[in-house]
Amino acid sequence: MERTTCCVVGGGPAGMVLGLLLARAGVEVTVLEKHGDFLRDFRGDTVHPSTLRLLDDLGLADRFAALPQRHVRSIRLPIGRDGDLFTVGEISALPGKYNYVAMVPQWDLLDLLANEAKREPTFQLRMNTEVTSFLMERGRVTGVRYRDRVAGSTGELRATLTVACDGRGSLARALPELGLREFPCPMDVWWFRLPREERDPQGLVGNAGDRYLTAMIDRGDYWQCAALIPKGADDAWRAQGLDQFLASFAEATPWIRQGVADREPRPRSWDEVKLLDVRMDRLRRWHRPGLLCIGDAAHAMSPVFGIGINLAVEDAVAAARHLVEPLRKGTVGLADVRAVQRRRWPTAAGTQLLQRIAHARVIEPLLQGRSPGIAGQPLRLAQVLTKAPWLKRGPAYFLAYGAGRERPPAASLRRSG
């Protein structure tokens, strides 16, 4: 029978950060990842200042800086009928050396974390290992059953604590006692790529089209494009044809002077446009004896503000700080996992509240062909922000750090270099 102290289900950002922090502190930890690698296109690739500072604390800043990346230093939105771009969040105005968002392919970040964690004798990463169910004894989760997706074999892994970091499709969400609460979302998202030219603007750019919104992420030689479309409209919109959508996308993006048709390579089929079914929900309870949920497994976020990954990382940091000593002593109880939810729930719930307000007051009206507004004035708040530079720091700080910074366990820290 296999056994570990902490079984981490899912090798995404939350799972890998938690595994690294615990292993550095001397806790035996096993991360189970169902895929054979981390290569998934159109995953969230934003690494915010809060995560950059964490990597610095862990002594990984230099190796992270060597990864291919693009820095976003401003948030830009179209204001007014002409679609002129205004900066509404100046991240570069924030204090400290990490006053930017790094755009890095998520697989590069995960490879960095995994390779660093493998240096610890108490860490094990098992790829192609899919968790199929929980082991239960007298009302307590005591580990997991798994299947090797290559060999087809099955097995059991016992653990003092199991942490679900496997996203919004987590097995833990089927446990009725955790109480999943869902919130309505007015949109889905299409992801695709377009070539970027030197004359294009830099950073993170938003635009509005006919019943859809766009966000374009500067990735150096190409744009990672997101089109927010009305919820459930995927089939009907695809039936209208890809060329029509790309033409309307170009019309909503004034600085693409020559249109999408002149940019190569561009999407040639709908297979190159990926659909994200947007959901927003939150578990009422993130825990039960022997089990803790963090990241999207506990609270699936809307893509609004683009901070879901960094919230998951902060969850992992808080979990490591609260659990490292109980795990070392083998005394993890319900009070310990409950403390993690008490710490992180206000940030998750507060962020989702802001996202729901943005859904109701800005995104849903635009997707329905109506003018957005706050207090009856279309985009008045954004216009005020563009005229008051000191106010730009508010949205910039929220994007960079969320509600606050989590500190990793002292035993997990390393000097840079």
Image (cartoon, rainbow, N blue to C red):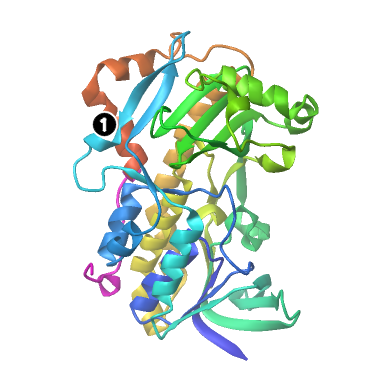
The picture places residue 303, in percent across and down from the top left corner, at 52, 39
Q: Identify the image quadrant of residue 67.
A: bottom left
Q: Name the residue under label 1.
A: 393
Q: Which residue is drawn at 53% across and 49% down?
A: 299
Q: Where is residue 272 in the image (x, y as percent from the top left)?
A: 68, 42
Q: In this view, does 32 lie to the left or right of 269?
A: left
Front-most of residues 117 and 159: 117
Q: Nearer the viewer, residue 146 or 322?
A: 146
The image quadrant that residue 271 belongs to is top right
Q: Is residue 404 magenta?
A: yes
Q: Residue 268: name its quadrant.
A: top right
Q: In this view, does 27 lie to the left or right of 267?
A: left
> Is any atom of residue 294 visible in this view?
no
Residue type highlighted by circle 1: Arg
In this picture, is 153 found above or below 290? below
Dot 1 crowding, Cα within 10 Å, few <14, some 14–19, many 20+? some
Image height of 317 relative to 24, above or below: above
Residue at image position (39%, 26%) is: 76
Identify the residue shown where x is 42% and y is 61%. Answer: 316
> How many numbered callouts?
1
Q: Say whether residue 184 is magenta.
A: no
Quick one: 180 or 298, which is closer to the camera?
Answer: 298
Between 7 and 41, which is closer to the camera in this rendering? 41
- Magenta highlight range: 401-417
Inspect this view and state whether residue 322 appears.
Answer: yes
- How far across and how far down the image is residue 96, in percent? 19, 46
Residue at position x 62%, y 50% from top? 180
